[in-house]
């Protein structure tokens, strides 16, 4: 798998900070790069590497964050994005679903759990210490007609996914947040699942897999 360190994964037309206002109705949009591959020593994993890519025509390791033409609006063709970013004390409860509902490679990526906003210094810049924090306890499902892989203790970081593991820090604007009006949320981070469990009955070749995804999505619900 090529590294996401150089190209990243991106999403929005106007940037993470420009969320919908009260008098507008903005649809969910984003870019997703998710991959499944053998974990270290996971010789039993024969799953194809590419999982959900939005846009679908990207090549491994996923869509280029630097190309605004990669932005996908939910409902385009057979692509569906659903997300919620719900404030919960100092953290945010996430539910993110990225689906390809038809074509040659249908599938669903589901991410659920709680994450904290990005840690920043007095000048508003992300800190290396904060970006190294592994926000655990996320549940992630990789589901398609050939398999169902699941892990209940995945972790998130504000880093790029580099061959299935955390790489360089995401760009400065990456964060999890809601707008000042509280009516739209956005999330830009990566999730890592080093010990995916094969829930597919009678299906071999799916043991010893790990999964990762870099997502950047905006205009999520906040309730």
Image: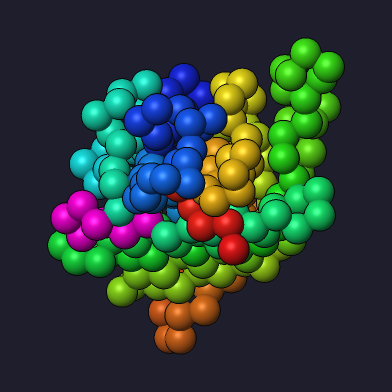
In the picture provided, is 184 more to the left or to the right than 53? right
The residue furthest front is 23
User: From this viewpoint, is residue 150 visible?
Assistant: yes
Position of the C terminus, as image quadrant, is bottom right
User: From this viewpoint, is residue 209 visible?
Assistant: no
> Please, is residue 108 above or below residue 172 in the view?
below
Image location of residue 72, percent across then percent down? 29, 43
Residue at 75 percent of width and 58 percent of height = 88
Residue at 58 percent of width and 57 percent of height = 222
- How many numbered circles does the render carry? 0
Q: Coloring scheme of the render?
A: rainbow
* Segment colored magenta: 75-81
Image location of residue 179, percent across then percent down? 58, 40
- Splitting the image into 4 quarters, where does residue 171 fall? top right
Residue at 47 percent of width and 41 percent of height = 21
Return the residue nearer the eye: 77 or 89: 89
In the picture provided, is 89 more to the left or to the right than 142? right
The residue furthest top is 123
Image location of residue 127, percent across then percent down? 78, 22
| Residue 195 in magenta stretch | no
- Splitting the image into 4 quarters, where does residue 68 fall? top left
Position of the N terminus, as image quadrant, is top left
> Please, is residue 146 above or below residue 35 in the view?
below
In the picture provided, is 13 more to the left or to the right than 110? left
Image location of residue 208, percent across then percent down? 57, 61
Residue at 37 percent of width and 21 percent of height = 66
């Amino acid at each position: 798998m090529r590294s996401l360190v150089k190209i990243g994964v991106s999403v929005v037309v106007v940037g993470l900070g420009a969320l919908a206002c009260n008098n507008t109705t903005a649809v969910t949009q984003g870019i997703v790069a998710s991959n499944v591959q053998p974990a270290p020593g996971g010789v039993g994993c024969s799953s194809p590497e590419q999982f959900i890519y939005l846009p679908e025509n990207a090549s491994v390791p996923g869509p280029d964050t630097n190309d605004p033409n990669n932005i996908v609006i939910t409902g385009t063709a057979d692509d569906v994005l659903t997300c919620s970013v719900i404030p919960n004390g100092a953290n945010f409860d996430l539910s993110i679903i990225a689906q390809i509902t038809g074509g040659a490679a249908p599938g669903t990526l589901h991410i659920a759990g709680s994450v904290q906003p990005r840690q920043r210094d007095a000048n508003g810049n992300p800190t290396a210490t904060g970006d190294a924090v592994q926000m655990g306890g996320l549940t992630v499902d990789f589901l398609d007609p050939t398999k169902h892989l699941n892990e209940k203790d995945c972790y998130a970081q504000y880093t790029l996914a580099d061959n299935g593991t955390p790489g360089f820090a995401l760009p400065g604007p990456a964060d999890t947040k809601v707008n000042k009006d509280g009516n739209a949320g956005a999330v830009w981070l990566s999730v890592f699942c080093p010990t995916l469990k094969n829930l597919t009955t009678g299906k071999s070749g799916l043991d010893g897999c790990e999964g990762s995804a870099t997502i950047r999505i905006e205009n999520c619900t906040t309730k």
